[in-house]
């Protein structure tokens, strides 16, 4: 991989960095729906695998539900196989990967992809705790809601697909605190990694959803 140079035949990747609850997933979903990006969320893939009871799900279940990270080797294998399914013209947003420096290095070593930039969603910690503990997601399509800020039209039912809204096992308060501790520990290394390679941009994740989306569209053009 030649750093900073897109060879033209690589899958073009934007990495979204940020704490759980920083809004990466919401923004990535909108960019995928309206602007031609492919959204790859490792958290969604893992939750789907756990729900379906696949081998991957069985291996990842305990880590995910305790708020721990799934081991790098398993995640690197998962992302390589997920990315190999995209055509070389694809513009992919990675949401939730990399989470560690070895994952970032493995992504850069993948010959068929090019990480063009890393966007860091910066959000104060007290806001993250409020967002996460009040979050509910659709069991079927993983559309996010919030008990105060983003309420569905009908209590407990997804507006998009009528699926049931649930609280993720890792969104309960003690697990949230653990996830944020882990995030703070590892994120500094990732920010340094992308900063050193001139690929880091920071964005105010506290902006209203629409404003943040407009800023991202400008940035990713
Ligand atoms: P997320 O939906 O991105 O908050 O991810 C939910 C959970 O999935 C995390 O708390 C981890 O247990 C696991 N996970 C997702 N992505 C990764 C990753 N890149 N490395 C390790 N574990 C991950």
Image (spheres, rainbow, N blue to C red):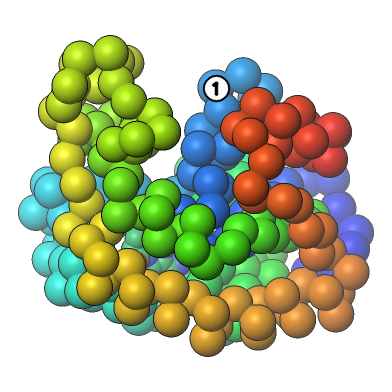
In the image, taking residue 105 as reference, residue 30 lies left or right, namely: left
What residue appears at the point 89 percent right and 69 percent down from the top-left corner? 198
In the foreground, 175 or 201: 175
Question: Residue 213, how many percent across, how many down?
Answer: 68, 32
In the foreground, 95 or 36: 95
In the foreground, 15 or 181: 181
Rendered view: 187 above or below 87: below
Crowd class of label 1 (few under 14; some 14 to 19; many from 20; radius 10 Å): few
Question: Residue 119, how many percent across, how many down?
Answer: 72, 55
In the foreground, 69 or 76: 69
Rendered view: 36 above or below 117: above
Question: Residue 203, how many percent across, how many down?
Answer: 75, 52
- Asked whether residue 114 is in view, the answer is no
Rendered view: 79 above or below 190: above
Q: Quadrant of residue 214?
A: top right
The residue beneath circle 1 is 33
Q: Quadrant of residue 118?
A: bottom right
In the image, taking residue 99 as reference, residue 206 lies left or right, namely: right
Q: Find the residue positioned furthest to the left.
A: 53
Task: Provide the secondary structure element on which disc 1 rests.
Answer: helix
* Ligand 1 under 8 Å from disc 1 Cβ: no
Question: Residue 63, how many percent across, how many down?
Answer: 23, 75
- In the rendered image, the quadrant that contains the N terminus is bottom right
- Asked whether residue 180 is in view, the answer is yes
Q: In which quarter of the image is ligand 1?
A: bottom left
């Amino acid at each position: 991989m030649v750093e900073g140079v897109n060879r033209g035949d690589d899958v073009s990747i934007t990495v979204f960095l940020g704490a759980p609850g920083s809004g990466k997933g919401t923004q990535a979903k909108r960019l995928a729906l309206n602007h031609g990006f492919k959204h790859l969320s490792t958290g969604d893939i893992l939750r789907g695998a756990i729900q379906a009871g696949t081998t991957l799900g069985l291996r990842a279940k305990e880590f995910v539900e305790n708020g721990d990270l799934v081991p790098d080797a398993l995640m690197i294998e998962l992302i390589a196989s997920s990315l190999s399914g995209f055509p070389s013209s694809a513009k992919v947003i990675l949401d939730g990967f990399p989470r560690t420096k070895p994952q970032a290095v493995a992504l850069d070593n993948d010959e068929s992809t090019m990480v063009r930039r890393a966007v860091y969603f910066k959000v104060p910690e007290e806001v993250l705790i409020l967002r996460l503990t009040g979050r509910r997601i659709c069991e079927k399509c993983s559309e996010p809601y919030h008990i105060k800020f983003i309420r569905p039209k009908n209590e407990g039912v997804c507006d998009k697909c009528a699926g049931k809204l649930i609280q993720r096992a890792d969104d309960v308060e003690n697990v949230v605190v653990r996830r944020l501790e882990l995030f703070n520990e590892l994120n500094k290394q990732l920010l340094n990694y992308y900063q050193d390679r001139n690929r880091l941009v920071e964005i105010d994740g506290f902006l209203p959803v629409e404003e943040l989306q407009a800023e991202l569209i400008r940035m990713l053009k």
